[in-house]
């Protein structure tokens, strides 16, 4: 059960579908686990979930597009979330966002072509005392500025390079 034309191995989804086959209300857990497997929810995965759960595809899409936790586009290996809420904004979040956009060559909401970085702007992370705040791969970094962000990016890029050398 693979979808090789899209490079998506649907057989990875089989254990999840079996796990929840007796629970008709488990669409969200199925989607969550599918996203953990693939990193996002590509159309062939959504089609297979709809087919196997006997749910109309538009209903599956309705759930996926309603909840912000689900992603229809492939995301980067490193997720960078910059807060631009009031406290962060007045303390210079725009400078950090502009720096990241220029450094990564993408706009907020986009992923680099090599799928190493996704840049997101959020409007409150609940860490206002640490403003401006950036979350990198679920790690909260407070009192950020472009110089500190440059150091963080360098560490991330070094880790990517080291990983590539090990896999070569």
Image (spheres, rainbow, N blue to C red):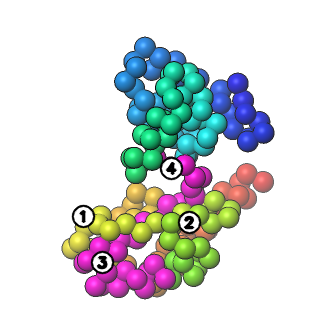
Which one is in front, 33 or 60? 60
Q: CA distance from mark 2 to mark 3?
A: 21 Å
Identify residue for label 2: 110
For the record, the magenta segment spans 70-98
Observer-side mark, 2 or 3, equals: 2
Q: Residues within 10 Å of mark 2 (few under 14, many from 20)?
A: some
Identify whether 139 is placed above or below 7. Answer: below
| Residue 82 picture quarter | bottom left
Q: Counting residues from the N terminus, which is met first, the one under dot 4 or under dot 3?
A: 4
Kind of element beneath mark 3: helix
Q: Give the image location of residue 104, x and y in percent.
A: 59, 75
Q: Is residue 27 visible?
A: yes
Q: Badge 3 is on which residue?
A: 88
- For the C terminus, the quadrant is bottom right
Q: Which residue is mark 4?
A: 71
State how far apart marks 2 and 1 are (Cα): 23 Å
Residue 148 belongs to magenta span: no
Determine contact: label 2, label 3, CB under 8 Å. Answer: no
Locate residue 147, reporting x and y percent. Answer: 46, 85
């Amino acid at each position: 059960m693979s979808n090789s034309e899209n490079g998506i191995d649907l057989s990875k989804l089989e254990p999840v579908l079996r796990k929840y086959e007796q629970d008709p209300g488990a669409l969200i857990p199925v989607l969550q686990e599918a996203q953990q497997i693939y990193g996002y929810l590509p159309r062939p995965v959504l089609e297979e979930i709809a087919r196997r759960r006997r749910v109309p595809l538009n209903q599956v899409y309705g759930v996926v597009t309603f909840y912000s936790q689900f992603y229809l586009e492939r995301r980067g290996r490193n997720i960078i979330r910059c807060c631009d809420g009031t406290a962060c904004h007045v303390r210079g979040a725009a400078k950090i966002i502009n720096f990241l956009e220029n450094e990564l060559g993408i706009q907020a909401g986009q992923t680099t072509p090599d799928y190493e970085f996704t840049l997101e702007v959020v409007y409150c992370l609940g860490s206002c005392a640490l403003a401006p705040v950036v979350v990198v791969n679920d790690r909260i970094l407070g009192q950020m500025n472009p110089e500190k962000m440059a150091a963080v990016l360098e560490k991330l890029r070094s880790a990517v390079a080291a990983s590539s050398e090990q896999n070569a």
